[in-house]
């Protein structure tokens, strides 16, 4: 099947073809016709399979061919927001908006992305020029509504992207507030990497007789990812990680820690071992996060240490290694973490360093993914069989979300930024990588100029 056969306009297919993509991924092949039909949609697919293009492509088609909406835009003195995409993090918001620009570059539509981390005045000024498609994080969107700097009365399409993550991060109340200020007549699209009881409740509240797509087994992990567990004592994790990186000549490694403090400490330890590393988490400035992501994507940085806040904002082709330095306390986060590798049909390796404190977490993860992970003891790092489990710190010292996946009352940053670009004239900085093969369906490019939390 080709993208033309999915019913997309020539202008959109042309933009896709410009980047060498010819074949839609399974989620795109099912989601695009469902969205084009105009009904609500509940879609589940494991990370890295092209969910973003699954809603971006048909959304662009519907907005560009909807004569009523176009007439409304032309009738007014400025553009009105016709599509709203909510995402949990800055990085993901930036990626989604870049996909909108990339695939809509031949359309008379423009887009903006707003999220926290910088002053709010520049975005207020730019929003006044009018936006067709807005990508936003929930809290910052509500800030604009409260200040009267945004009008959502003309929204035709609402997308909740990574809805499960938004619920994990405690955004359910913000989401309810957003729903209350949107026009009742609209198309609703809910995309999620995993399904949970909370997602089902949200779907029942939000969606009207939706089509349902699930292209992979519930909460499954990508089959091309080789997963293994290295048992180790808690105080030997850092030496083991350095040993694995050096002995295996790993050149690009994404490492997940449970807390922000733990991420910073590990970076210092790796640097002392002669291994280049940087950290990305909620306490890092926007410029620091952007720099770390850019250098890691380009291959200039050997190790990127992250908390779960960044798990869905890192989209890198051919990322070979993901290491769980600490296991997540929310089992679903394991799926999101290791989904950073094994993308675009490539193989990948996910290694977990597990101490006695984390045995219950490991059991919960294995129950979720319905498989027992193979265990391999590294010579010289044999765990002490007499070691006793100790309580695990779930949050960083400042009370913010430390990367364990909870963070229901997580604080949000004060400012936001917006970037508006014409989808017709702007040149994308980089083409989005393909999730289903070297020349398969499109996926958003890595985040640019982004950082901070979901606000």
Image (cartoon, helix red, strand yellow):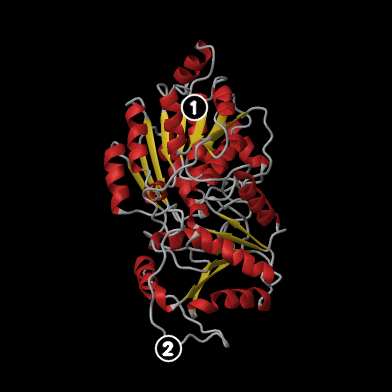
Tell me: residue 215, above or below residue 95: below
Instruction: Please state the horizontal and vertical placement of residue 410, each as a whole percent of the image.
Output: 41, 48
Instruction: Please state the horizontal and vertical placement of residue 411, each as a whole percent of the image.
Output: 43, 45
Whole-angstrom CA distance, mark 2 to mark 1, is: 62 Å
Instruction: Inspect this view and state whether residue 375 appears.
Output: yes
Q: Residue at x 66, y 70 (%)?
A: 250
* Badge 1 element: helix
Task: Name the disc covering residue 385, or none.
Answer: 2
Instruction: Please state the horizontal and vertical placement of residue 308, each as a whole percent of the image.
Output: 48, 57
Task: Name the disc covering residue 63, or none.
Answer: 1
Badge nearest the viewer, 2 or 1: 2
- The tag earlier along the polypeptide, 2 or 1, is 1
Can you tell which quarter of the image residue 218 is in? bottom left
Instruction: Please state the horizontal and vertical placement of residue 368, each as a whole percent of the image.
Output: 36, 65
Judge left or right: residue 100 versus residue 366.
Answer: right
Judge left or right: residue 292 versus residue 310.
Answer: right
Tell me: residue 142, above or below residue 320: above
């Amino acid at each position: 099947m080709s993208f033309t056969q999915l019913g997309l306009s020539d202008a959109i297919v042309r933009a896709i073809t410009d980047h060498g993509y010819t074949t839609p991924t399974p989620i795109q092949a099912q989601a695009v016709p469902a969205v084009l039909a105009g009904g609500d949609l509940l879609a589940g697919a494991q990370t890295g399979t092209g969910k973003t293009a699954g809603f971006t492509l048909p959304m662009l088609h519907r907005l560009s061919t909807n004569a009523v909406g176009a007439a409304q835009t032309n009738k007014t003195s400025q553009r009105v927001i016709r599509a709203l995409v909510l995402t949990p993090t800055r990085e993901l918001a930036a990626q989604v908006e870049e996909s909108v620009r990339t695939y809509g570059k031949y359309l008379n539509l423009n887009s903006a992305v707003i999220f926290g981390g910088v002053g709010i005045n520049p975005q207020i000024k730019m929003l006044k020029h009018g936006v067709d498609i807005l990508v936003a994080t929930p809290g910052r969107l509500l800030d604009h509504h409260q200040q009267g700097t945004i009008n959502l009365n003309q929204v035709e399409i609402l997308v909740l992207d990574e809805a499960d993550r938004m619920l994990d991060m405690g955004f359910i109340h913000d989401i309810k507030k957003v729903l209350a200020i949107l026009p009742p007549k609209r198309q609703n699209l809910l995309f999620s990497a995993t399904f949970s009881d909370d997602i089902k409740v949200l779907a029942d509240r939000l969606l009207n007789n939706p089509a349902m797509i699930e292209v992979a087994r519930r909460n499954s992990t990508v089959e091309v990812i080789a997963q293994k567990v290295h048992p180790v004592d808690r105080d030997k994790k850092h030496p083991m990680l350095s040993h694995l990186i050096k002995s295996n000549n790993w050149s690009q490694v994404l490492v997940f820690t449970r807390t922000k403090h733990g991420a910073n400490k590990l970076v210092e330890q790796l640097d002392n071992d002669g291994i280049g590393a940087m950290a990305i988490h909620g306490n890092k400035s926007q410029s620091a996060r952007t720099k770390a992501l850019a250098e890691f994507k380009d291959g200039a940085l050997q190790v990127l240490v992250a908390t779960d806040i960044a798990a869905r904002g890192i989209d890198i082709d051919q990322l070979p290694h993901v290491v769980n330095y600490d296991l997540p306390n929310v089992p679903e986060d394991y799926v999101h973490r290791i989904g950073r590798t094994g993308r675009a049909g490539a193989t990948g390796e996910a290694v977990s360093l597990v101490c006695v404190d984390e045995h219950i977490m490991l059991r919960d993860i294995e129950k979720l993914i319905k498989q027992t992970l193979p265990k391999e003891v590294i010579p010289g790092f044999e765990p002490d069989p007499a070691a006793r489990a100790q309580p695990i710190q779930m949050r960083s010292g400042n009370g913010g979300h430390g990367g364990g996946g909870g963070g229901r009352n997580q604080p949000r940053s004060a400012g936001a930024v917006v970037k508006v670009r014409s989808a017709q004239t702007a040149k994308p900085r980089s083409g989005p990588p393909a999730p289903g093969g070297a020349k398969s369906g499109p996926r958003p490019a890595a985040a640019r100029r982004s950082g901070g939390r979901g606000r």
